[in-house]
Protein backbone atom coordinates (compact mmCIF):
# COMPACT_ATOMS: atom_id res chain seq x y z
CA UNK A 1 0.00 0.00 0.00
CA UNK A 2 1.39 3.41 -1.00
CA UNK A 3 1.48 5.82 1.85
CA UNK A 4 0.23 9.30 1.14
CA UNK A 5 2.63 12.06 2.28
CA UNK A 6 1.29 14.31 5.01
CA UNK A 7 -0.07 17.62 3.72
CA UNK A 8 2.34 20.51 3.79
CA UNK A 9 1.64 22.94 6.61
CA UNK A 10 2.45 26.60 6.14
CA UNK A 11 5.16 27.78 8.55
CA UNK A 12 2.93 30.62 9.77
CA UNK A 13 0.26 28.14 10.84
CA UNK A 14 2.50 26.77 13.63
CA UNK A 15 2.36 28.41 17.01
CA UNK A 16 5.30 30.79 17.15
CA UNK A 17 5.43 33.13 20.10
CA UNK A 18 8.16 35.30 18.58
CA UNK A 19 6.23 35.96 15.38
CA UNK A 20 3.04 36.51 17.35
CA UNK A 21 4.85 39.10 19.47
CA UNK A 22 6.07 40.97 16.39
CA UNK A 23 2.64 40.88 14.75
CA UNK A 24 1.17 42.27 17.97
CA UNK A 25 3.77 45.07 17.96
CA UNK A 26 2.93 45.91 14.36
CA UNK A 27 -0.79 45.96 15.12
CA UNK A 28 -0.23 48.22 18.15
CA UNK A 29 1.85 50.64 16.09
CA UNK A 30 -0.78 50.66 13.34
CA UNK A 31 -3.52 51.43 15.88
CA UNK A 32 -1.45 54.27 17.32
CA UNK A 33 -0.78 55.64 13.85
CA UNK A 34 -4.49 55.52 13.05
CA UNK A 35 -5.19 57.37 16.32
CA UNK A 36 -2.69 60.05 15.31
CA UNK A 37 -4.15 60.38 11.83
CA UNK A 38 -7.65 60.93 13.23
CA UNK A 39 -6.64 64.14 15.04
CA UNK A 40 -4.58 65.57 12.15
CA UNK A 41 -5.80 67.42 9.05
CA UNK A 42 -6.10 65.07 6.04
CA UNK A 43 -3.08 66.44 4.14
CA UNK A 44 -0.88 66.11 7.19
CA UNK A 45 -2.33 62.74 8.22
CA UNK A 46 -1.31 61.31 4.84
CA UNK A 47 2.31 62.29 5.54
CA UNK A 48 2.57 60.45 8.88
CA UNK A 49 4.01 57.13 7.66
CA UNK A 50 4.95 55.21 10.82
CA UNK A 51 5.04 55.68 14.57
CA UNK A 52 6.89 53.90 17.36
CA UNK A 53 6.88 54.35 21.11
CA UNK A 54 10.35 54.17 22.61
CA UNK A 55 10.38 54.46 26.39
CA UNK A 56 8.30 57.61 27.04
CA UNK A 57 8.84 59.11 23.61
CA UNK A 58 6.68 58.93 20.51
CA UNK A 59 8.61 58.77 17.24
CA UNK A 60 6.69 59.76 14.11
CA UNK A 61 8.25 59.06 10.72
CA UNK A 62 7.58 61.19 7.66
CA UNK A 63 9.28 61.72 4.30
CA UNK A 64 10.44 65.34 4.42
CA UNK A 65 11.61 68.01 6.82
CA UNK A 66 8.69 70.21 5.82
CA UNK A 67 6.13 67.67 6.94
CA UNK A 68 8.16 66.94 10.08
CA UNK A 69 8.01 70.60 11.10
CA UNK A 70 4.26 70.72 10.38
CA UNK A 71 3.76 67.65 12.59
CA UNK A 72 5.61 69.37 15.43
CA UNK A 73 2.94 72.09 15.50
CA UNK A 74 0.41 69.41 16.45
CA UNK A 75 2.54 67.89 19.22
CA UNK A 76 0.13 68.62 22.09
CA UNK A 77 -2.88 67.30 20.18
CA UNK A 78 -1.00 64.18 19.10
CA UNK A 79 0.32 63.49 22.62
CA UNK A 80 -3.13 63.82 24.18
CA UNK A 81 -4.60 61.46 21.57
CA UNK A 82 -1.79 58.92 22.05
CA UNK A 83 -2.01 59.01 25.83
CA UNK A 84 -5.66 58.00 25.51
CA UNK A 85 -4.68 54.99 23.37
CA UNK A 86 -1.40 53.87 24.91
CA UNK A 87 -0.77 51.99 28.13
CA UNK A 88 2.41 53.94 28.84
CA UNK A 89 2.47 57.68 29.47
CA UNK A 90 4.06 59.47 26.53
CA UNK A 91 5.91 62.63 27.55
CA UNK A 92 7.61 63.81 24.36
CA UNK A 93 7.25 63.53 20.61
CA UNK A 94 10.00 63.45 18.03
CA UNK A 95 9.67 63.47 14.26
CA UNK A 96 12.05 61.49 12.09
CA UNK A 97 12.60 61.70 8.37
CA UNK A 98 12.56 58.56 6.23
CA UNK A 99 15.35 59.06 3.75
CA UNK A 100 13.83 57.71 0.53
CA UNK A 101 16.52 59.43 -1.52
CA UNK A 102 19.23 57.32 0.09
CA UNK A 103 17.35 54.18 -0.92
CA UNK A 104 17.23 55.39 -4.53
CA UNK A 105 20.90 56.41 -4.50
CA UNK A 106 22.11 52.91 -3.67
CA UNK A 107 21.60 51.85 -7.27
CA UNK A 108 23.32 55.00 -8.55
CA UNK A 109 26.69 54.42 -6.91
CA UNK A 110 29.31 56.64 -8.45
CA UNK A 111 32.11 54.88 -10.24
CA UNK A 112 35.63 56.28 -10.33
CA UNK A 113 36.77 58.08 -13.45
CA UNK A 114 39.71 56.07 -14.70
CA UNK A 115 42.35 57.31 -17.12
CA UNK A 116 42.57 55.73 -20.54
CA UNK A 117 44.57 52.55 -21.05
CA UNK A 118 47.24 54.51 -22.96
CA UNK A 119 47.74 56.90 -20.02
CA UNK A 120 48.02 53.98 -17.59
CA UNK A 121 50.71 52.36 -19.77
CA UNK A 122 52.47 55.73 -20.12
CA UNK A 123 52.50 56.04 -16.32
CA UNK A 124 54.09 52.59 -16.06
CA UNK A 125 56.79 53.42 -18.61
CA UNK A 126 57.52 56.91 -17.25
CA UNK A 127 57.75 55.67 -13.66
CA UNK A 128 60.71 53.46 -14.61
CA UNK A 129 62.81 56.56 -15.39
CA UNK A 130 62.33 58.14 -11.93
CA UNK A 131 65.44 57.90 -9.73
CA UNK A 132 63.72 58.22 -6.34
CA UNK A 133 62.95 54.60 -5.40
CA UNK A 134 60.01 55.38 -3.12
CA UNK A 135 58.28 57.57 -5.71
CA UNK A 136 59.00 55.03 -8.49
CA UNK A 137 57.49 52.18 -6.43
CA UNK A 138 54.44 54.26 -5.55
CA UNK A 139 53.78 55.18 -9.18
CA UNK A 140 54.24 51.57 -10.28
CA UNK A 141 51.77 50.34 -7.64
CA UNK A 142 49.36 53.07 -8.75
CA UNK A 143 49.63 52.02 -12.39
CA UNK A 144 49.06 48.35 -11.48
CA UNK A 145 45.96 49.29 -9.49
CA UNK A 146 44.62 51.52 -12.27
CA UNK A 147 45.18 48.76 -14.82
CA UNK A 148 43.37 46.24 -12.64
CA UNK A 149 40.42 48.64 -12.18
CA UNK A 150 40.39 49.41 -15.89
CA UNK A 151 40.23 45.70 -16.76
CA UNK A 152 37.40 44.98 -14.29
CA UNK A 153 35.20 47.73 -15.77
Image (cartoon, rainbow, N blue to C red):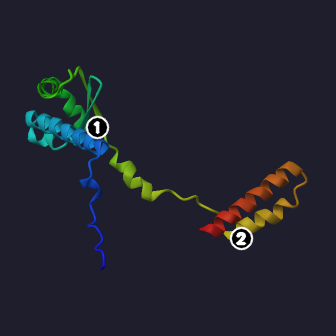
Kindly identify which residue carries mark 1: 65
Q: Residue at x 13, y 29 (%)?
A: 85
Find out whether the residues at labels 2 and 1 contact each other: C-beta distance under 8 Å: no
Under circle 1, the secondary element is helix
Say which quadrant the C terminus sits in: bottom right
Q: Which residue is mark 2?
A: 118
Nearer the observer: mark 2 or 1; the answer is: 1
The spot of residue 124 in percent (x, y) is 79, 64
How far from the left and from the top, in percent, is residue 129? 88, 60
Give the mark, 2 or 1, whose residue is nearer the N terminus: 1
- For image coordinates 13% across by 39% down, the residue present is 34
Q: Residue furthest front?
A: 1
Residue 61 location in percent, x, y? Answer: 26, 38
Residue 72 or 66: which is nearer the viewer?
Answer: 72
Foreground residue, 103 or 122? 103
**Residue that sits furthest to the bottom in the current view:** 1
User: Total label count?
Assistant: 2
Quarter of the rendering occupied by the N terminus: bottom left
Return the residue found at the far right. Answer: 131
* Residue 94 falls in image quadrant: top left
Determine the image quadrant of residue 144: bottom right
- Return the x and y of residue 47 as percentages of the image width and height: 19, 42
Q: Residues within 10 Å of mark 1 (few under 14, many from 20)?
A: few
Q: Quadrant of residue 37?
A: top left
Q: Is residue 7 above or below residue 133?
A: below
Residue 28, compared with residue 82, is above or below; it is below
Q: Is residue 38 left or right of residue 58?
A: left
Q: For numbered disc 2, what is the local secondary structure? A: helix
Amino acid sequence: MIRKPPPFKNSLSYLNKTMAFYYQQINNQQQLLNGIKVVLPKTLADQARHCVIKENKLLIYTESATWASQLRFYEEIILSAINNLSRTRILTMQTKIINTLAINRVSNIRKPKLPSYEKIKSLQVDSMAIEDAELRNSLQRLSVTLERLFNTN
